[in-house]
Image (spheres, rainbow, N blue to C red):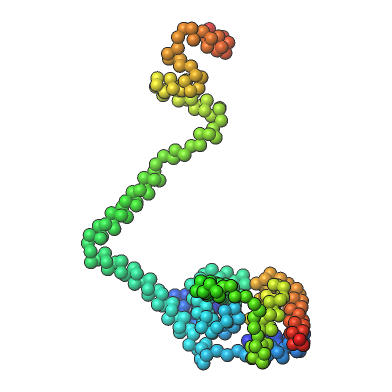
């Protein structure tokens, strides 16, 4: 089923729910991982993903088909996820006792823990220039095509491929350096 | 199927740039979700949408049922709506007095006064002259009139005197 057909089904009174089911069947899994990479836990991802589809369903008339339906959904999902993350962080800070706020120091990575590689990856990504990080995350984690990334960031395919290449090389270098120490 | 192809293409691309990183990422990014999560999700979303629209309908229903049970509330509600409508009509039909007098130039003031001088009564004229020329023409004495006449006589067009 094409994007246009899905949109038309959601816009028609009699086929709204069927249209929504098609929309979800097409994009829910990809969007789940996009959101999970931002918010972390499954429960939060589930909340944000449901809100994303509800928002898309209610605002389907605003979709102007200038970009693909997935790109439009991707924007809604990332906005929802970032808002959720911010509000969760604010709540956590508000409920934190005073002594917690003054705690500082490096993040402890336990040797031999299964999360060690993930922590190194996270550190490597944080060290990248913003654009390279964005492109790497969109391409590798969110599995977007260069065309989709281009629509979102308004960059050419060549520039995106170069950014992705540089990002991969820098991450590789970071992991090699931190593993030998 | 399309997603699987895309994933394969992305993994292959990464492998071509860095075999080591591709291996690390493959091991570290296992993708697992709760059992049958994606099968159940659409029904949950549709339930949520239906529940929220029912909530909105209920809100309206509650107001209507309240109005049905209490007659006095109907009159109060009708009065409130009438007052709002009347206030709106009054506001729209009221003349706009929002003239910015400070922005008028001397010529505009002069032409206005020439057009409307006939409508002004003695009190208004007296006030106008007092403000404008610091001379009260209605209560002027003969001694005060002489310098005023000297000043303004030369402006009189002699053709008009004939």
In the depicted structure, whether residue B151 falls above or below residue A5: above
Q: Give residue A19's position: percent from left, percent from top.
A: 50, 80
- Given residues A106 and B26, the one toward you in this image is A106
Residue A28 picture quarter? bottom right
Q: Name the side, left or right, on which B126 lies relative to A129.
A: left
Residue plotted at (67% across, 75% down): A134
- Given residues A84 and A54, the one toward you in this image is A84
Tell me, yes or no, if residue A178 can be seen here: yes
Q: Name the side, left or right, on which A28 lies relative to B55.
A: right
Q: Name the side, left or right, on which B121 lies relative to A150.
A: left
In the depicted structure, whether residue A86 falls above or below residue B131: below
Quadrant into which the N terminus of chain B falls: bottom right
Tell me, yes or no, if residue A145 can be seen here: no
Residue plotted at (68% across, 77% down): A126
Q: Give residue B58's position: percent from left, percent from top.
A: 34, 72
Residue A137 picture quarter? bottom right
Q: Give residue A55's position: percent from left, percent from top.
A: 50, 73
- Given residues A69 and A122, the one toward you in this image is A122
Residue B124 picture quarter? top left
Residue plotted at (41% across, 78% down): B50
Residue plotted at (40% across, 46% down): B92
In the depicted structure, whether residue B115 falls above or below residue B2: above
Q: Which residue lies furthest to the front in this view?
A: A99
Q: Give residue B37's position: percent from left, percent from top.
A: 51, 88
């Amino acid at each position: 089923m094409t994007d246009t057909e899905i949109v038309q089904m959601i816009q028609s009174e009699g086929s709204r729910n069927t249209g929504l089911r098609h929309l979800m069947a097409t994009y829910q899994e990809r969007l789940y991982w996009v959101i999970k990479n931002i918010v972390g836990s499954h429960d939060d991802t589930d909340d944000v993903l449901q809100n994303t589809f509800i928002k898309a369903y209610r605002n389907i008339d605003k979709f102007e088909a200038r970009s693909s339906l997935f790109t439009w959904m991707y924007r809604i999902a990332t906005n929802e996820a970032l808002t959720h993350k911010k509000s969760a962080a604010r709540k956590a800070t508000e409920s934190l006792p005073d002594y917690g706020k003054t705690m500082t120091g490096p993040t402890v990575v336990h040797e031999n823990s299964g999360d060690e590689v993930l922590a190194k990856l996270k550190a490597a990504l944080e060290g990248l220039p913003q654009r390279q990080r964005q492109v790497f995350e969109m391409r590798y984690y969110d599995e977007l095509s260069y065309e989709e990334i281009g629509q979102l960031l308004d960059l050419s395919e060549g520039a995106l491929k170069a950014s992705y290449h540089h990002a991969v090389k820098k991450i590789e270098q970071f992991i090699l350096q931190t593993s030998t120490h | 199927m399309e997603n699987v192809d895309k994933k394969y293409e992305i993994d292959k691309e990464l492998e071509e740039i860095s075999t080591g990183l591709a291996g690390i990422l493959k091991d570290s990014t296992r993708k697992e979700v709760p059992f049958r999560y994606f099968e159940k999700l659409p029904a949950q979303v549709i339930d949520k949408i239906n529940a929220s629209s029912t909530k909105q309908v209920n809100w309206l229903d509650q107001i209507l049922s309240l109005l049905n049970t209490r007659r006095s509330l109907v009159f109060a509600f009708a009065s409130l709506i009438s007052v709002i409508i009347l206030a709106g009509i009054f506001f729209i039909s009221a003349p706009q007095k929002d003239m910015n007098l400070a922005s008028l130039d001397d010529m505009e003031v002069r032409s206005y006064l020439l057009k409307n001088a006939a409508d002004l009564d003695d009190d208004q004229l007296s006030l106008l002259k007092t403000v404008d020329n610091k001379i009260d023409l209605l209560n002027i004495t003969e001694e005060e009139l002489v310098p005023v006449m000297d000043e303004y006589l030369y402006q009189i067009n002699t053709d008009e005197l004939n």
